[in-house]
Image (cartoon, rainbow, N blue to C red):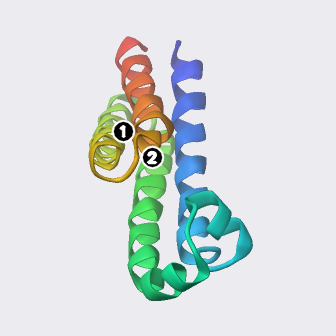
């Protein structure tokens, strides 16, 4: 179970690294516009806000990677903390932005928490 938990945590970390790239680099590019369903005008107006949001996703990714590197009980606590942060962000995004965020961000975090606790 421990290997599966670590694989899921690593996937979530990579997802949040991708979110960082989407929000900080690709926000106003065709792939960013498609991913978020926004217009070029909206992207131009919100580029700084999106970059800030992307930076936070990078922190989540780094925290999950840190937990994986630490391993053991200490790593488990770090992984649980950052997975809980991802879960809260997913729930909040699902309630305030689009329900899709709940499934893309919140559900994997909940699965990750369950797997880490079970390992």
In the rendered view, tell whether residue 48 sits above or below residue 101. below
Residue closer to the observer: 13 or 23? 23
Residues at marks 2 and 1, CA–CA distance in whole angstroms: 7 Å
Circle nearer the viewer, 2 or 1: 1
- Could you tell me if the residues under marks 2 and 1 are in contact, i.e. CB atoms within 8 Å? yes
Residue at image coords 72%, 72%: 30
Q: How many neighbours does mark 1 have within 10 angstroms: few (below 14), some (14-19), or many (20 or more)?
A: many
Which residue does the numbered mark 2 point to in the structure image? 64
Residue 13 position, x and y percent, is: 53, 47
* Residue 67 relative to residue 84: left or right: right
At x 46%, y 34%, the residue is: 103
Residue 33: name its quadrant: bottom right
In the image, residue 101 sits, relative to residue 37, either above or below, namely above
Q: Residue at x 41, y 52 (%)?
A: 63
Quarter-of-image position of residue 115: top left
**Which residue is at a point 45% across and 46% down the rendered structure image?**
64
Task: Please name whichever residue, 66 or 15, is drawn nearer the observer in this view of the structure.
Answer: 15
Local SS, label 2? helix
* Above or below, comparing residue 18 to residue 78 in the picture: below
Residue at the right extreme, as displayed: 30
Q: Quadrant of residue 27?
A: bottom right
Q: Position of residue 50 (x, y in %)?
A: 44, 74
Q: Earlier in the sequence, mark 2 or mark 1?
A: 2
Determine which of the numbered discs, if any, sits on residue 21 in the image.
Answer: none
Residue tagged 1: 83
Q: Is residue 9 left or right of residue 84?
A: right
């Amino acid at each position: 179970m421990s290997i599966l938990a670590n694989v899921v945590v690593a996937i979530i970390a990579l997802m949040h690294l991708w979110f960082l790239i989407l929000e900080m680099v690709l926000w106003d590019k065709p792939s960013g516009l498609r991913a978020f369903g926004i217009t070029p005008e909206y992207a131009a107006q919100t580029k700084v806000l999106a970059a800030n949001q992307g930076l936070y996703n990078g922190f989540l990714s780094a925290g999950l990677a840190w937990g994986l590197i630490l391993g053991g009980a200490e790593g488990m606590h770090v992984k649980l903390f950052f997975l809980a942060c991802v879960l809260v962000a997913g729930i909040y995004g699902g309630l305030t932005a689009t329900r899709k965020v709940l499934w893309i961000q919140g559900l994997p975090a909940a699965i990750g928490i369950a797997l880490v606790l079970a390992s």
